[in-house]
Amino acid sequence: MSAYGVKIASTGSYIPERVVTNLDLERLVDTSDEWIQTRTGIRERHVAAEGETTSDMAAAAGRTALDRAGISPADLDLIIVATLSPDTFFPNTACYVQRKIGAGKCASFSIEAACCGFLYSLDVAASMLRGGGFKYALVIGAEKISMHVDWTDRTTCVLFGDGAGAVLLERVPADRNTFLASSLGADGNYTHLLRVPAGGSAMPITHEAIDQRENTIKMAGRETFKLAVNAMAGAAEEAMRRAGVTIDQVRWLVPHQANKRIISMVGQRLHIPEERVYINLDRYGNTSAASIPIAFDEIVRADRIAPGDTALFVAFGGGLTWAAAVVRW
Ligand code: UT7
């Protein structure tokens, strides 16, 4: 047992200005507002400006979290950015964030675990703080996922949006720990269900790959949907069991925002009333690694969570990966 625990000291988020509505997409592909709302729950999403990068959005969310906690960037010991849409393959996106927010020479790296990236990063940061060598960690989920979107593919382009969310983690004595438990998992047998085929070593970018749009998101939606419900419910149950928390004690279920129907089914499986399940995908779509920290920041800013309340985070994404965490505010 470590002498240290971890708490979420503050939150922040950033949403790019430009809104793309379902009606806008009706003009691009053969779809309808009615189909998108019924099948996904999404009404609109935000898309980053042309020159706006993932690290710009991550830095904005991170700065807000630091300001709210009254912590200087210079006090940071660690920055982790979860993203599947990095500024560059390398250097990693957290290094750009470090410079943009004026942090010192703290450890800075990125994690790619698709839509579970934020929860994986939270776990890694918490372990590092518990180890004793780090005190303040900025954990950010940030995506310019629009860069991966094929705007001619109606089966995927209606789903995604850009944005960033951040939490500032602080090392505290073990008896003040509020990061209660987590559960992470993956199944590499399903790498083919949700991916961007080209751009890595398996299929380097070539003119041909681009012509065939292999540099954009490909998803087997129906298969992914089915696996998502089981994996999310299972991870959430396991994290609650490890935390010694029952669903009646959970003030908010904060799920990854991929599809309203997935969220409802997970909520039903966990037996949590609808009014304690947070949904904002109607306004942002699926922002991948950014979705949970954006949602949690909204809850905190709206004063919809009180000190001592418990939140259950749960995510699912490409990999396939799944993750859940139980935190006390
Ligand atoms: O964030 C990471 C994890 N991602 C997910 O968890 C996403 C999981 N999957 C989903 O959310 C859903 O599967 C989708 C929203 C992607 C699709 O919904 P669905 O109810 O599973 O639809 P479907 O793929 O079974 O397609 C039903 C029909 C098809 O037409 P046919 O074959 O029945 O004639 C599609 O071609 O809907 C058609 N369709 C559309 N129609 C209008 C697919 N996309 C669209 C569209 N507009 N945008």
Image: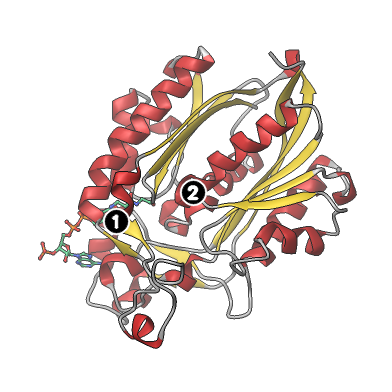
Question: Amino acid under label 2?
Answer: Ala
Q: In which quarter of the image is residue 58?
A: bottom right
Q: Which residue is drawn at 68% across and 65% down?
A: 91
Q: Is residue 142 left or right of residue 189?
A: right
How far separated are the C-alphas under marks 2 and 1? 15 Å
The secondary element bearing badge 2 is classed as loop
Question: Which quadrant, please, contains the N terminus?
Answer: top right
Between 107 and 63, which is closer to the camera in this rendering?
107
Q: Which of the marked residues, 2 or 1, is nearer the chain's N terminus?
A: 2
Q: On screen, 17 above or below 143? A: below
Q: Where residue 192 sits in the image (x, y, percent)?
A: 29, 56
Q: On screen, 258 above or below 144? A: above
Q: Which residue is drawn at 29% across and 48% down?
A: 190
Which residue is the site of mark 1?
Answer: 192
Question: Which quadrant, please, contains the C terminus?
Answer: top right
Res 113 label: 2
- Residue 153 visible, this orientation: yes
Q: Quadrant of residue 197?
A: bottom left
Mark 2–mark 1 CB contact (< 8 Å): no
The secondary element bearing badge 1 is classed as helix
Q: Which residue is drawn at 65% across and 20% down?
A: 308
Q: Where residue 287 sits in the image (x, y, percent)?
A: 48, 56
